[in-house]
Image (cartoon, grey):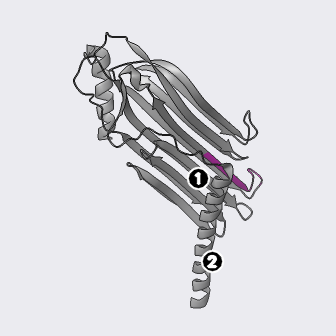
């Protein structure tokens, strides 16, 4: 939260006082801000994780009533991306299973180079991919935003809910375009992914549901222009491989299987003790 407060103060100063950032010797960017919040609960109980920092955040719950698995991935490098996956199943009448995920990565960006008049722009190529996939009883969102002060320079979002989207059960944006962006001023990059899923054994929802979301950008500047891409410390500038639907499915099945095996071991131990 401390890092996030720095972002607010920095943006406020830039907009209200018009700090002359065009001719500074070196770019000064706030540290990247990361957050991951996951939760999973069934009729048997609940589990959750709320952590600020890069990495994997996982919550799972397995019991006689069903299985709930939830995971968020927030990575600043080797390529900055945010991903979320949810999977639930309810296995008895009047039983339920629910999950939620929220992942954020916020960092600074500047196209740094020779001093230039305020308002000078250069051509910047953006490659950005966002995916949101859902089934009945679930929803997913992926979001990329590039902001300058309080102004939004670029914004792309993909949403899928209850398996409804323009491309079957998934929505996505796939950007590979060149934009005119300001030099020697700080931009803010926001990456966001969220999923949730619900299943019930009483007909209110499907008895199994899953969702996933993913977002990953990269900025490129022609070196001949004399400007370089500068990011917050620890954040890389690259695009990774896009997770295929089969990869998500195998990951979900793998964790669900681990949960089931753990439940079987607990049940067997309790039976032997009796």
Task: State whether residue 241 is above or below residue 116.
Answer: below
* Residue located at (58% from left, 84% from top): 270
Where, quadrant-wise, is the N terminus in this rendering?
top left
- The answer to whether residue 211 is magenta is yes
Q: Which residues are magenta?
A: 203-212
Q: Which residue is mark 2?
A: 264
Q: Is residue 16 visible?
A: yes
Q: Residues within 10 Å of mark 2 (few under 14, many from 20)?
A: some
Image check: 136 left or right of 111?
right
Secondary structure under badge 1? strand
Q: Where residue 261 sits in the image (x, y, percent)?
A: 61, 74
- The answer to whether residue 149 is magenta is no
Where, quadrant-wise, is the C terminus in this rendering?
bottom right
Image quadrant assignment for residue 272: bottom right
Q: Which residue is mark 1?
A: 99
Task: State whether residue 181 is above or below residue 195.
Answer: above
């Amino acid at each position: 939260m401390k890092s996030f407060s720095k972002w607010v103060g920095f943006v406020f100063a830039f907009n209200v006082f018009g700090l002359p950032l065009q001719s500074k010797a070196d770019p000064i960017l706030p540290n990247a801000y990361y957050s991951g919040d996951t939760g999973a609960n069934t009729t048997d109980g609940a589990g959750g994780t709320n952590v600020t920092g890069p990495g994997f955040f996982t919550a799972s719950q397995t019991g006689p009533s069903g299985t709930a698995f939830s995971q968020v991935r927030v990575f600043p490098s080797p390529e900055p991306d945010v991903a979320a996956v949810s999977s639930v199943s309810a296995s008895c009448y009047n039983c339920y299973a629910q999950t939620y995920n929220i992942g954020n990565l916020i960092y600074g960006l500047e196209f740094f180079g020779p001093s230039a008049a305020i308002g000078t722009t250069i051509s910047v190529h953006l490659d950005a991919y966002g995916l949101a996939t859902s089934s009945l009883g679930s929803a997913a969102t992926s979001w990329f935003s590039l902001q300058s002060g309080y102004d939004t320079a670029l914004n792309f979002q993909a949403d899928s809910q209850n398996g409804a989207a323009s491309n079957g059960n998934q929505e996505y944006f796939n950007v590979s375009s060149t934009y005119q962006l300001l030099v020697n001023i700080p931009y803010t990059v926001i990456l966001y992914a969220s999923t949730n899923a619900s299943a019930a054994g009483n007909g209110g929802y499907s008895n199994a549901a899953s969702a996933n979301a993913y977002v990953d950008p990269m900025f490129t500047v022609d070196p001949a222009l004399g400007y370089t891409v500068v990011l917050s410390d620890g954040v890389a500038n690259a695009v990774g491989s896009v997770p295929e639907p089969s990869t998500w499915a195998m990951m979900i099945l793998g964790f669900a299987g681990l949960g089931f095996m753990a439940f079987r071991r607990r049940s067997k131990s309790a039976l032997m003790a009796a």
